[in-house]
Amino acid sequence: MCDGIAATGSTAIAVCGSEKLADYAKTQGIQAFPPKDGIVAKAGLRFLQNDPPKLVYLGLEESDGAGHSGNYPHYLSVLDRYDRYLARIWAQIEALNIAGHPTTLIVKVDHGRGRGAKWTGHRWNLPGSNQIWMFAAGHGVPQRGILQNTTTRSLYDLRPTTEHLLGMPPKTRLWGNVIAEFFPKD
């Protein structure tokens, strides 16, 4: 099941699970394999070129399997691919912003990894697993460089942050708050 945000006057595509990703890729004429995060990047680029959205949200997951494999060179090659995907997507978003189509990019990963010899794993009691990175840039997110977060955050914070970026009032919920560190203090 995917949670989504309904935004008036916009188009949203949610593709959940590997089977649905392969089906979506086929309908869009995108080569399904390899790699699956490449499908996400290509679909995002195509969407940016055809119907510029206000927000692009990418969840990259392929690095997880590469990390579990224990093959560090392969893991680094996945991260290198991410850099290339994001460079192309960011170039498109910058062009849209210059052309008057305000667009924001959010990128997240699913979790952290262990440290040292335990880098291949993650779980609640493995140091480092609770530390993740995310990226937000573009319209509505001032350039602030790399921020070291001292507030405990979770993936639950992404939805209210996204709602805030879209100018929507964040819904009241049990978990999740706007990630205020992305925005300047008033």
Image (cartoon, rainbow, N blue to C red):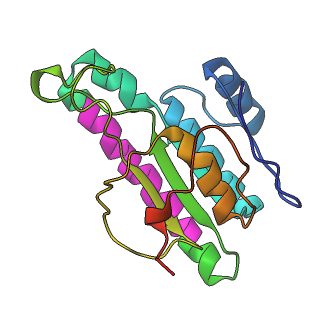
> Residue at image x 57%, y 66%?
92
Placement of 80 over or under 138, stated as above or below: above
Percent from the top left, x then y, of residue 116? 11, 28
Residue at the farthest right position: 9
Q: How many marks?
A: 0
**In the drawing, does residue 69 fall left or right of residue 172?**
left
69 vs 74, nearest the viewer:
69
91 vs 140, nearest the viewer:
140
**In the drawing, does residue 175 fall left or right of residue 69?**
right
Percent from the top left, x then y, of residue 7? 82, 55
Placement of 141 over or under 24, stated as above or below: below
**In the drawing, does residue 72 fall left or right of residue 83?**
left
Quarter of the image for the N terminus: give it: top right
Placement of 53 over or under 17, stated as above or below: below
156 vs 33, nearest the viewer:
156
The secondary structure making up most of the magenta span is: helix
Placement of 31 over or under 59, stated as above or below: above
> Residue at image x 43%, y 56%?
135
Quarter residue 150 falls in: bottom left
Can the viewer see residue 45?
A: no
Q: Specify whether residue 77 is painted magenta.
A: yes
> Residue at image x 24%, y 22%?
126
Q: Specify whether residue 56 is painted magenta.
A: no
Percent from the top left, x then y, of residue 162? 63, 55
Q: Which region is colored magenta?
A: 75-93
Can the viewer see residue 74?
A: yes
Percent from the top left, x then y, of residue 132? 35, 41
